[in-house]
Amino acid sequence: MGCGSSTPEAAPATGADNGHRRTPADDPAEIGKSNAIDRQLERDRQQDELKVKLLLLGAGESGKSTIFKQMRIIYGTPRSEDDLRMYGVVVRSNVVTAVRKLCQLLKSLDVESQLAGESAADPEDTMSPNEAYELLRAHLIDGNGPPLEEETNGGADWVGHSARAGLGPNNDAKLFLQLWRPIKILWESRTLKEVWQKRAQVNIIDGHKDYLQDVSRIASSSFKPTTQDILLARVKTTQVVMERYRIDGIEFEMYDVGGQRSERRKWLDCFDNVDAVLFVAALSEYDQKLAEARRTNRMIEALELFRSVCNNRAFSNSQTSIMLFLNKKDVFAEKILYSDIAAQPEFKDYAGPPRDFNHGVLYFIQRFKECLISDEQEFKDSFIHVTCATDTNNMEFVLDSTRTIIMTDNLRRSGFLGNG
């Protein structure tokens, strides 16, 4: 009987008065769920609006990836042991790359004969600088050296092999362990100190001097890369790399892209909804040529690239802040002592005193400001930073200041701070 009486009673409950059956939209529980979903979507939308997208741009080897690594050191998580092993291989490979270029430069400068009269700086070394050079040249340039045995400073090597580093770096890292003693002997010679000052001719990474001064540690079986080793490590960026950081409740997305000409076609994929471009240029490259275009001055390339970025339609509106990082100030300060800015054909208009750091920096700041085509474009001095990307204390201050400027700009564009 219960079954028979339940049917007529169900009809009025489904909405007999308005002529349709009850739908999920009429169910209070379903309405509550829908409202909860709408509220979550709105929170997600607001959170996405608060998210800050940063894009690192600049020519190759300007220091973009070093700044990218500094973000992780300051705001991110520690490196895993797998990361450290990969960087261990890269560091050793970087040493071999630097020494290979130095041997080529030494030969091209025709100063090989100077090595013949030198003795090893360390009396305990059994090989002369000239013998060390001949061995290194045979293996790193001519490819006809005698068989070698791998040697580390005692015990099983902690770094070992890293598939992530790639075949080339692993092969060079192995060569390093076989040749680290002659590398140390040659580096300590007076002749190579003179050759080092002309390193711009073969585009050696300036910071790798620190590696060359610490070869014994890097060759140690217990070698584990330090934070500074990682910052100095050179790994060519060949793809877009993104990392997220949560800083004071705000999510930041930072994108690093390759700076070589062949990599720039990938930049367009990152141009949407960018809050700030951090453009990095190396001050110290005023006397260097591009690796991919030997007749083009690196600073001129950076200036032209900055011009194209500032006047790109994706960034030329008021929605994107552009920050200029003039990097490698430490190398610049050292280099101007023996490489005159005005002696470079591209910068013969430099009228400041030679070997003057401040005048040199101000000159290049003005050159970058001149890249702005429109009179309406504004480039505030607060948007320009003179940096040393391998100095964590310096970069922590710079990145914190940059973050504050970007957030203030975002609030102003949103109408919260007016137009002042």
Image (cartoon, rainbow, N blue to C red):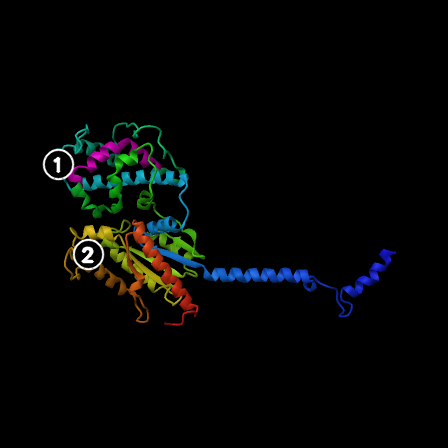
**Amino acid, disc 2:** Phe
Residue 413 in percent (x, y) is at 41, 68
Q: Earlier in the sequence, mark 2 or mark 1?
A: 1
Q: Amino acid at mark 1?
A: Ser
- Give residue 100's quadrant in the image: top left
Rendered location of residue 396, percent (x, y): 33, 53
Residue that numbered label 1 is attached to? 113
In-front residue for pair 173/404:
404
Q: Name the disc covering residue 357, or none.
A: 2
Q: Residue at x 30, y 41 (%)?
A: 94
Report whether 16 appears left or right of 396. right
Q: Residues within 10 Å of mark 1 (few under 14, many from 20)?
A: few
Q: Residue drawn at (22%, 54%), measured in percent from left and top?
A: 286
Q: Residue 2: which quarter of the image?
A: bottom right
Residues at discs 2 and 1 in contact (Cβ within 8 Å): no
Quarter assignment of residue 165: top left
SS at mark 1 in the image: helix
Q: Secondary structure at mark 2?
A: helix
Q: Is residue 173 magenta?
A: yes
Q: Quadrant of the N terminus?
A: bottom right
**How far apart are the two marked residues, 2 and 1, measured between alpha carbons?**
35 Å
> Range of the magenta residues?
170-192
Residue 314 seen in the current view? no
Residue 284: percent from left, percent from top: 23, 53
